[in-house]
Image (cartoon, rainbow, N blue to C red):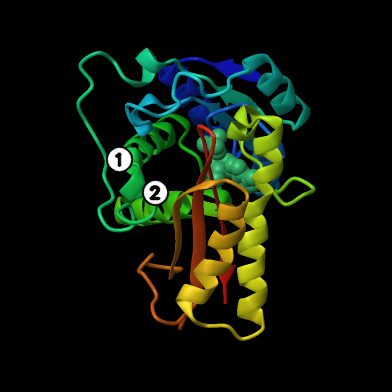
Amino acid sequence: MRIVRTISEMQALSRRWRGAGDPIGFVPTMGYLHEGHLSLVRIARRRASAVVVSIFVNPTQFGPNEDFDSYPRDFERDEALCRREGVRAVFYPDAEEMYPPDYSTWVTEEQLSGPLCGRSRPGHFRGVCTVVTKLFLAVCPDVAVFGQKDAQQALVIQRMVRDLNFPLQVVIGPIVREADGLAMSSRNKHLEAAERRAATAVFKGLQAALEAFRSGERRTDSLVQLVRAPIKASGGRIDYVELVSRERLEPMSPEVTAPALLAAAVFYGKTRLIDNVFLG
Ligand code: AMP
């Protein structure tokens, strides 16, 4: 397994593999890998003979008061996990490699980036679109795999890939959860024991809403309330709980009428967690 620190080396390697007829699968991450990330690596391996994982905590997608500095990092552990999963290369650039001092070019998606996390994290998706573009141009993948855990990000990337004609296929992998339902996240490491226990309320709420939906409940307010109630009772601070259309992320009210995304962002202490389920 290669550890690649520069864009030029990554591009050369990618050209070589492509020349040898090896399709390239790509899983972009911010590291501190868990089973959610590894599930995406396995999806990529089924579709491509050469899998590249990038590990880059992208400064431009964090707001000024967010957790860029404290974001968990452990490259040695990540490297060992990638090796075990049969990854061919880990692309591990530093911030200067990705953003030279006079860096001044940005990629923005201007529709799907607006609601949900876009509202509470201004500039976040501009950072995401920019870094994913740069990673795509470094790795030149045939297939890129993203997680449903970041549902809005997945939609934004799919739109960007379509709009800018990136010659690659985007695949979305399902959310991997802990035994008690908590969606796996690198940020879970920051939860104190009591917060960790309380945080299961997010999935419990989403699950309650999903069950109510399956039993015929269609009122947006009632479904959202089923998510909010257990989170509030658990001491979580709600950033948002929203029911939006699955394709366009538009609010659905007063009733759910089409396939919908029920998404939540919640703080436990300083840690912001996101999770979601599909309805219909
Ligand atoms: P991150 O390192 O958090 O930026 O995530 C890198 C990729 O892994 C993104 O496409 C995420 O959506 C995906 N991912 C993160 N957590 C999970 C999870 N629990 N299940 C599935 N995919 C995940």
133 or 257: nearer the eye? 257
Does dot 1 land on a helix, a strand or a loop? helix
Residue under the point 57% across and 50% down: 149
Q: What's the CA distance linking mark 2 and mark 1?
A: 12 Å
Dot 2 amino acid type: Cys
- First reached walking from the N terminus: tag 2 or tag 1: 2
Residue under the point 25% across and 53% down: 110
Whether residue 38 is visible here, answered yes or no, is: no
Query: Image height check: is 229 above or below 45?
Result: below
Residue to which mark 2 is pinned: 117
Question: Taking the image as four quarters, which one is ligand 1 found in?
Answer: top right
Disc assigned to residue 148:
none
Query: Image height check: is 37 above or below 117?
Result: above
Q: Is 61 placed left or right of 256 in the picture?
A: left
Residue to which mark 1 is pinned: 126
Query: Picture quarter containing residue 53?
Result: top right
Dot 1 amino acid type: Arg
Query: Image height check: is 121 above or below 264?
Result: above
- Residue 69 image position (x, y, % from top left): 45, 18
Residue under the point 66% across and 84% down: 215
Q: Which quadrant of the rendered structure holds the N terminus? A: top right
